[in-house]
Image (spheres, helix red, strand yellow):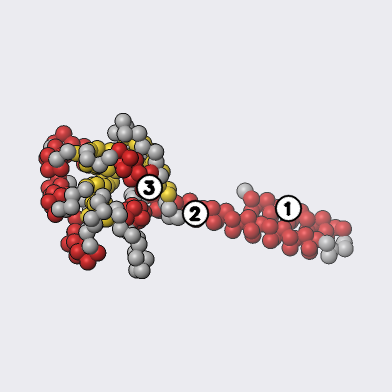
Amino acid sequence: MDNYKVLLLFPESLKIHNRVAFLSTVFQEQYDEKESIVRDVRWRTKYYDIKFDIYVDTYDAFEEWAVNFAADECKELRDVLSGMIFVFEDKNHEPVIDCIKGIIDETFEDFTNKFFIGCLFNESTIIEDDLYELNNDLIIQNLEIVNWFDKAGPSMDRVGSERIKEIIDVHPWPCNAQTIKSSQEHVDSKSNDLGSFIAKLEKAKQKYQTINNNTEAEEFLESMIEELSDMIV
C-alpha cells in the first residue's frame, strides 16, 4: 500500500536550523530545506511498523495559508492526510489556535481518523493549567497543543517533542496493528511447533535407547519417523 501522509507546517519566520532540529528530533530524519517532501519515514513501535511521507510547507500569514488550504484544489491532499502538525511562534496563540480549529471543522468532511497537533515553538510557553484546560476543549477536534520547550515535571507526563511522538504512537493507523499482531502470532505458532518437535524427538530417542529387541526397535523407529515427518510437513 502507499505510504501514509502527514503535513508539517512551519512559519516562514522559524529559522532553518530550528526546522531541521524539529524534524530530526521528532522523526529522526535529516531535512534538506529545499525539499518539500520527506519520503519513507519509518515509524516503529512495539505494536506496529509503518512508513509515511512528510509534506513540509511554510506560511507567512497563517490565515491566508488556511484559506488556500481550504480551496477545492487541495481537497485531494486533505483526503489522503493522516495527520497535520502546525508549528507556530506567536505568543498570542489564541488567534492561531482558533484558525486551526476552523481548518479542522470546515475543511474536513471527516476528521475522526486523523490527528492534529499544534506546537508552540516559543520559550514563552502556555502555562500548565491553561494548557490543560485548552486541550480539554480541543478534544472534539482531535487537536492537542504542545509547548515545544516544556520540561518534564514530577508527574512524568510526556511533554514537548516526546509528547508529539506519543500522539503519533497512539494514533490508530489503519490495519497495521492487526497485521503485526497476526505476524507475531504466526511466529509464535511456529516457535511452539518447533518446541513440540524437539521435545518429542528427545523422548523418542530416550525410549529407543531402552528397547533391547531389534525388531521392536526397528518398528518403533519407523513409527516415530513417520510421526515426526507429519509434524514438519
Q: Name which residue lies at 51% across and 53% down.
A: 186
SS under mark 3:
helix
Q: Residue at x 22, y 62 (%)?
A: 127
* Mark 1 in CB contact with mark 2 (< 8 angstroms): no
| x and y percentages locating residue 216 in the rendered image | 83, 60
Question: Which of labels 1 and 2 is toward the front?
Answer: 2
Separation of marks 1 and 3 at Cα, in angstroms: 57 Å
Q: Is residue 198 left or right of residue 160?
A: right
**In the rendered image of this protein, does residue 198 appear above or below residue 90?**
below
Disc 2 versus disc 3: nearer the observer: 3
The residue under label 1 is which amino acid type?
Ile
Of residues 42 and 3, the one nearer the viewer is 42
Disc 3 residue type (three-letter): Thr
Q: Does 115 sit above or below residue 4? A: below
- Secondary structure, mark 1, is helix
Disc nearer the start of the sequence (2/3): 3
Name the residue that disc number 1 marks. 225
At x 72%, y 58%, the residue is 201
Residue tagged 3: 25
The answer to which of marks 1 and 3 sits earlier in the sequence is: 3
Image location of residue 185, percent across then percent down: 50, 56
